[in-house]
């Protein structure tokens, strides 16, 4: 019996605040205006700005790059041509790659014993200077313990001989013609949640167009072929200085509203200089540009030899940022719910404040209940 | 004294709305049902669906891949075997790599002067046609200014000679046997916030199992060894067409609830065709499949030579998506707080509306205060 | 007229609950304390902890790595030195790379016919055992159908001959000296939304400092040069065991509050062992460490040959996690709005409860209205 009573009480009784109907011009106008403002805010912010009625998904993406163009050097009368196989690292068209712009070549290195470079830190007077077990972190080999040389004596090392001397960096860079190379970017994105697959070769970018176009932020913003010189300039660098080594980030932005037609979903390219400008304060302080070493091995007279290249270049990092949005009932309900919630809170807060004000204007109050 | 008074006023006085206790069957039931609905929503949505009582973390992850299998070609009587070292780029087992399925080989290239290909754009009648400084972006070398050839004359270039002729692509692909290669994926994830380390070689995937298993979405969803032909099929492609060049994304999804035992935290593999299907409208329009060039350098008769390979292949991009969840007191309190908030707002809103209704049913109202 | 009346009603009339001014010591104190608590929570949580007044941005980042140090091996009297070109894969200073610590070398392989390894699975008694079309997934070549050998007969294969025998792994690892190599990390981050560019070579990290410093979590937490042995130790591994193959994740964390000076925006390095410890239960079960194969091709006597290396090493994955925050008016307004919302809800809820309590303390109630 008690439980039945409690249940019937729970269901059939409830408490509600006594309402007061207030007639007051100024307060009434203010109250409604605030409510309208809140409503505008909810619709404007939650629905239009933050698109609360849509669900989102990020893409599974694949980037493939291909360089075109040929470089030409003529060092000491030795003509040489550098094609994409020679100047792109790695070769397989990665989203992060390096284009060689300058190099120091050391030919015919083979495993053996030879003296270190004639730099202060390698100099020695007698064998005892070289026997210290402490191997120079930046040395070229394993010290044999001998001090060799005719006039300037240096420690002897087991190393790829002769050791590389990288003190004179060719200036201007040997492959300044890299400015005219072109980069072709192929980017596929798949939004798994919506089953939508897009390519940066969007509608209208056909074989004919690709053959002749070059990317330009205003006239050809969808052409997937970029001139290296343009890329460097768009990221705020100077080609002559970045040729000594630098890095550029290419961001491909896919912000798609899939409530519109898929063909509206197009990439936007932006370019960010990452490092390479000598006027940058960071650079002035403690950096060495971008370079790495690379070797081509070969066999000569039954002995393993290598051609060592110290490669200076521009590193490109292609970063895909993607977000697709599409109408979905769950976020819509959540957005409406939170909108109603905000509206309710604000309305009640206003009434709370107004009821305080109304105390002082009691004469204008007409009771609706009691 | 004034301050003391104000403080005591602040602490000991407060305002509260006058409550009305209403007895009305229909309104009461509706009111309680709405409140129950809101409570169910809060528990169901905030706690069960969105797991608001848990904190989240994404993983630091490492992917290592290893291909197994041997390809065999017999071109013009020259038997050749292709092992993983020959057909995987890059060699070190990256999360993004290419498996060669077809190739065009150009043997014995060396630096020198030779005529360009007999394509319309390289044709010339006299030396003057070649002297234009404009270097063809897609040319193979640096024009010497001479127009050479017996019957069909083309411009002479300094280049890796002879220049590659890639007009006839072997069809069917030379390494169709790639279908039977297997890919082993090793993926480690570490959730730093929870100190949890997991591997895709989960409990039960032992050495014995790995030796014999092959991934199958229904029967062996945790086997880390994938047959290439299966991967292609699962991503919606046809092997014969993707062998001309394409890309596949393999997504490893780690969605883990660490409130359960760690051993419940298992990877889920999904496969997304990125490009490579010729029936795709995109492809029909403007693409060239996936290919890159690669050279093996050697020394012959004291001269640098190279074997150039134009490699067609399938690119695999392994993408790890991870999110781990675990009970945490802070999000729990926040979730409860927001739950109470929503409940409060809705309850008050209902009362607000009901008090409007109750105006018309005044006779049934019993005043609790006054 | 009706519309005008309705409009004027809409604007000039509104409902407000009747307020009750309550004087009750205990209830009043509790009420104010709860309100203060909520206020403290809003300010503490929304503003100070979650920094609700700031917008956030993630960085476009580029990582460049460079190894220094020389390894030395003396196998069967053959002295050999391994420099960065020999032991780092890939060569171009990627954010994900491998440092070789051990290897199995197979010299002078050429394309031809030779017997398989004398392992149980390759053994045969007669040619008929080898003719099965089923190619061993883990075999080294394409079976010719012959069963060859003097004492132990195995199937003959077309392969790179002689086939590699990787049963005896050098122990201890041949390049234990890798412990003393150093890794230089150069990391640039650009926060596009704020136009802020930072490098891990922060203020005070100049050329002079870089030449001598080595990273140490307590004494030199900003030195970008890491000793390999330290990296292994900091990630919880033992060098002798990880030298058989493992993976380490280096996380560079850029959590920057750009309301302070840019120079306060500094990287924090953390290290996570991904795999490589043999005491790990996972490892004991089903893994093979980290290794891959790599070949150096050469031409000898007009025939293509290769030196095959099975490389065991430590893989480093450098992961950049970045989030910058800066004051922004929009999230500030949103945070204030939600703060006011929570405060309002809680205050009303308290009042609601208190009005229930006040029913029982009616004598102390003084009516403010009516």
Image: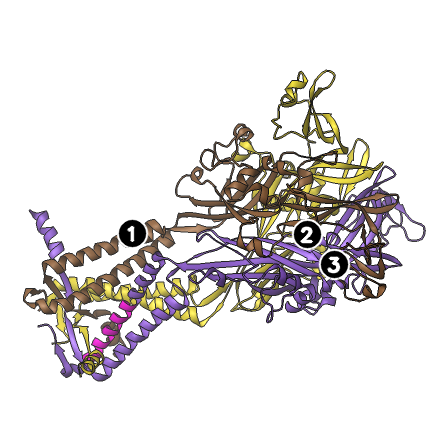
Chain colours: A yellow, B purple, C brown
Q: Which chain is indicated by disc 3? A: C
Secondary structure at numbered mark 3: helix
**Tag 1 residue:** C43
**Cα–Cα span, label 3 and label 2:** 41 Å
> Which quadrant of the view contains residue B182?
bottom right
> Which quadrant of the view contains residue C66?
top right
Residue B352 in view, yes or no: yes
> Which quadrant of the view contains residue A137?
top right
Q: Nearer the viewer, mark 3 or mark 2?
A: 3
Q: Nearer the viewer, mark 1 or mark 3?
A: 3
Residue A288 lies, in percent from the top left, at: 60, 34
Which labelled disc corresponds to residue B157?
none
Compared with residue C146, is residue A128 higher up or lower down, i.e. above or below? above
Given residues B57 and C206, the one toward you in this image is: B57
Residue B359 lies, in percent from the top left, at: 18, 79
Label 2: how many Cα within 10 Å (few below 14, some 14–19, many 20+): many
**Tag 3 residue:** C120
Segment colored magenta? B343-359
**Tag 2 residue:** A93
């Amino acid at each position: 019996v008690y439980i039945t009573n409690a249940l019937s009480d729970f269901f059939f009784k409830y408490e509600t605040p006594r309402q007061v109907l207030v007639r007051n011009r100024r307060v009434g106008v203010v109250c409604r205006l605030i409510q309208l403002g809140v409503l505008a805010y909810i619709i404007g912010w939650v629905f239009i700005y933050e698109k609360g009625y849509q669900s989102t998904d990020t893409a599974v993406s694949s980037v493939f790059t291909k360089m075109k163009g040929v470089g030409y050097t003529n060092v000491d009368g030795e003509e040489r041509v550098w094609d994409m196989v020679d100047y792109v690292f790695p070769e397989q068209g990665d989203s992060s790659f390096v284009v060689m712009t300058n190099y120091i070549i050391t030919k015919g290195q083979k495993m053996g014993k030879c003296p270190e470079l004639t730099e202060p830190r390698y100099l020695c007077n007698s064998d005892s200077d070289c026997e210290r077990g402490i191997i120079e972190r930046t040395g070229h080999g394993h010290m044999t313990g001998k001090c060799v040389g005719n006039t300037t004596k240096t420690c002897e090392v087991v190393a790829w001989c002769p050791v590389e001397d990288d003190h004179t960096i060719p200036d201007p860079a040997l492959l300044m013609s890299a400015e005219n190379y072109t980069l072709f970017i192929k980017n596929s994105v798949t939004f798994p949640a919506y089953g939508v697959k897009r390519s940066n070769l969007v509608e209208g970018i056909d074989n004919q167009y690709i053959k002749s176009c070059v990317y330009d932020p205003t006239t050809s913003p969808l052409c997937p072929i970029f001139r290296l010189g343009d890329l460097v300039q768009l990221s705020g660098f100077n080609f002559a200085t970045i040729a000594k080594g630098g890095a550029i980030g290419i961001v491909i932005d896919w912000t798609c509203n899939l409530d519109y037609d898929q063909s509206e979903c197009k990439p936007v390219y932006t370019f960010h200089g990452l490092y390479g400008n000598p006027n940058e304060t960071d650079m002035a302080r403690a950096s060495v540009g971008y370079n790495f070493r690379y070797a081509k091995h070969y066999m000569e007279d039954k002995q393993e030899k290598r051609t060592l290249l110290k490669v200076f270049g521009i590193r490109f990092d292609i970063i895909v940022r993607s977000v697709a949005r599409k109408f979905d009932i769950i976020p819509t309900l959540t957005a409406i719910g939170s909108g109603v919630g905000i509206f309710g809170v604000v309305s009640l807060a206003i009434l709370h404040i107004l009821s305080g004000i109304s105390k002082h204007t009691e004469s204008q109050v007409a009771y609706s209940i009691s």
